[in-house]
């Protein structure tokens, strides 16, 4: 629970009574950012008072004398939330790459070690032979624990927080390559230089989706990080013309940038034959401001020729993010789909855009909590068939995660 002392300090800063400046523009935006977090952020339990309070100190605000300084400040404030969904809408050349969209290594902190839990298919890390299970020991020649402690001054004290910081660091600044030192099970170390994903992205087809009809009649519909594209629904309808009674696998492993609920409902609506609950929303700011909570369930309606009779499995992984995660949950409840794959990105809530008045910059904050219809928080939802990795790495002669999804259709057809 937040202390009244910190709340009072933030309110004083917002009123402008705490400081006086000749040119207060950047400082005013800094105060406004703190106020937005206080008022609208849907996960107040993640606000660490001991880490956020120094950002409200007069000396810290006085030091912001330029827009560049404001951006550095804002990025560090948001890092205190340990939330990959809380980001600035602007960036600089030295800003760290966004996670999960612009990272190819999924880091976790376990038992005192920084472990590479997964490696993104088709990425520079995959092509360099980095494999899940390796330990990260250094970044740019600096011990990884030191690098984590230096990220915005830290401290990141929990396994979750250290994993968050490591994911940010391995994404790297946008203007340079990444130098990583990794260690194998037998203690051997290896240094590798990787381009960042702003220089060398993930190759994708031009179409929002692609369809592959397997020999046994299962249709695999792959979504290519396109859940926000205008032509998505039309492309889905064209691809689903091939769907037969055997089954459909919806491949959401490459949806790190999320998307919008129109496209999600456009896809899911093809697999229901009656109006069905889809996902649960909780707008926390209303409860905080009025004392009366607001929560509602979004529904999906049937659309087009129904495929509700067709067994469906949804394939997910670490690079299934935001709307991709919501879509997986929606398929699970509304269409009875099997969810197969690795844990998803765990992005928190629905993001709202807020504008800082001096710079006009956008701050993107999760302002709604999102849950499965059964109340499970979206970030806690796990596949029914849970795998260590859902990615395809060099040297593999098959796609094990896809095979598991197809097998789930055979094992328990609806």
Image (spheres, rainbow, N blue to C red):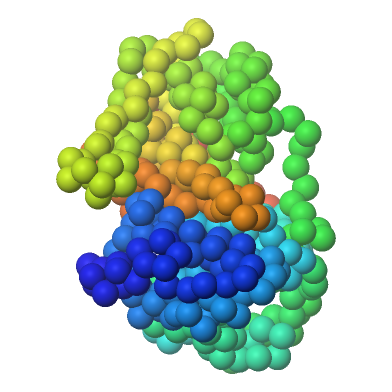
Q: Is residue 363 visible?
A: yes
What quarter of the picture does the N terminus occupy? bottom left
Q: Which quadrant of the rendered structure holds the C terminus?
A: top left
Q: Quadrant of residue 27?
A: bottom right
**Disc count in the image?**
0
Residue 80 position within the rendered picture, expressed as x and y whole percent measured from the top left: 45, 71
Residue 53, above or below 303:
below
Q: Position of residue 37 (x, y in %)?
A: 41, 59
**Image-based side of 190 in relation to 378, left or right:** right
Nearer-the-camera pick, 118 or 296: 296
Residue at the far left: name it: 291
Residue 256 located left or right of residue 179: left
**Residue 239, relative to residue 139: is it above or below?**
above
Q: Position of residue 337 (x, y in %)?
A: 38, 32
- On screen, residue 261 versus residue 22, left or right, reads left
Which residue occupies 39% across, 77% down? 53
Residue drawn 56% across the image and 90% down it: 146
Question: Residue 316, position in %: x, y?
Answer: 50, 46
Q: Is residue 164 above or below residue 239?
A: below
Please report the residue visible at 37 percent of the width from the left and 67 percent of the height from the top. Answer: 12
Give the residue drawn at x 34%, y 72%.
9
Can you name the residue that lies furthest to the top here?
A: 305
- The front one of 97 and 225 is 97
In front: 85, or 375? 85
Q: Is residue 99 visible?
A: no
């Amino acid at each position: 629970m937040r202390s009244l002392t910190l709340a009072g300090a933030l309110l004083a800063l917002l009123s402008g009574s705490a400081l006086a400046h000749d040119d207060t523009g950047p400082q005013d935006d800094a105060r406004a950012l703190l106020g937005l977090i206080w008022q609208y952020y849907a996960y107040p339990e993640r606000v660490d008072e001991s880490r956020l309070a120094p950002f409200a100190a007069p000396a810290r605000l006085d030091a912001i004398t330029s827009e560049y300084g404001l951006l550095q400040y804002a990025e560090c404030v948001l890092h205190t939330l340990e939330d990959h969904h809380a980001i600035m809408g602007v960036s600089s050349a030295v800003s760290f790459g966004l996670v999960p969209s612009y990272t190819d290594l999924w880091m976790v902190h376990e038992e005192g070690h920084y472990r590479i839990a997964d490696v993104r298919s088709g990425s520079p890390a995959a092509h360099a032979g980095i494999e899940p299970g390796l330990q990260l020991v250094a970044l740019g020649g600096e011990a990884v624990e030191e690098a984590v402690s230096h990220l915005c001054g830290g401290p990141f004290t929990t396994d979750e927080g250290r994993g968050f910081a490591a994911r940010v660091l391995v994404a790297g600044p946008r203007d340079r390559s990444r130098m990583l030192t990794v260690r194998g099970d037998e203690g051997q170390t290896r240094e590798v230089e990787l381009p960042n994903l702003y220089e060398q992205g993930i190759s994708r087809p031009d179409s929002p989706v692609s369809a592959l009809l397997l020999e046994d009649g299962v249709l695999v519909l792959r979504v290519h990080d396109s859940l926000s594209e205008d032509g998505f629904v039309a492309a889905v309808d064209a691809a689903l013309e091939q769907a037969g009674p055997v089954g459909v696998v919806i491949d959401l492993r490459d949806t790190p940038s999320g998307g919008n609920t129109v496209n999600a409902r456009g896809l899911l609506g093809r697999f229901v034959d009656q109006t069905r609950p889809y996902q649960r929303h909780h707008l926390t700011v209303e409860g905080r401001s009025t004392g009366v909570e607001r929560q509602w369930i979004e529904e999906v309606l049937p659309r087009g020729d129904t495929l509700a009779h067709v067994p469906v499995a949804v394939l997910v992984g670490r690079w299934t993010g935001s709307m991709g995660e919501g879509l997986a949950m929606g398929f699970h409840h509304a269409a009875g789909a099997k969810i197969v794959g690795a844990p998803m990105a765990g992005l928190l809530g629905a993001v709202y855009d807020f504008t800082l008045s001096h710079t006009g910059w956008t701050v993107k904050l999760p302002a709604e909590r999102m849950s499965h219809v059964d109340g499970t928080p979206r970030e806690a939802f796990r596949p029914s068939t849970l795998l260590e990795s859902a990615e395809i790495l060099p040297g593999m002669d098959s796609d094990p995660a896809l095979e598991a999804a197809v097998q789930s259709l055979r094992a328990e057809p609806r």
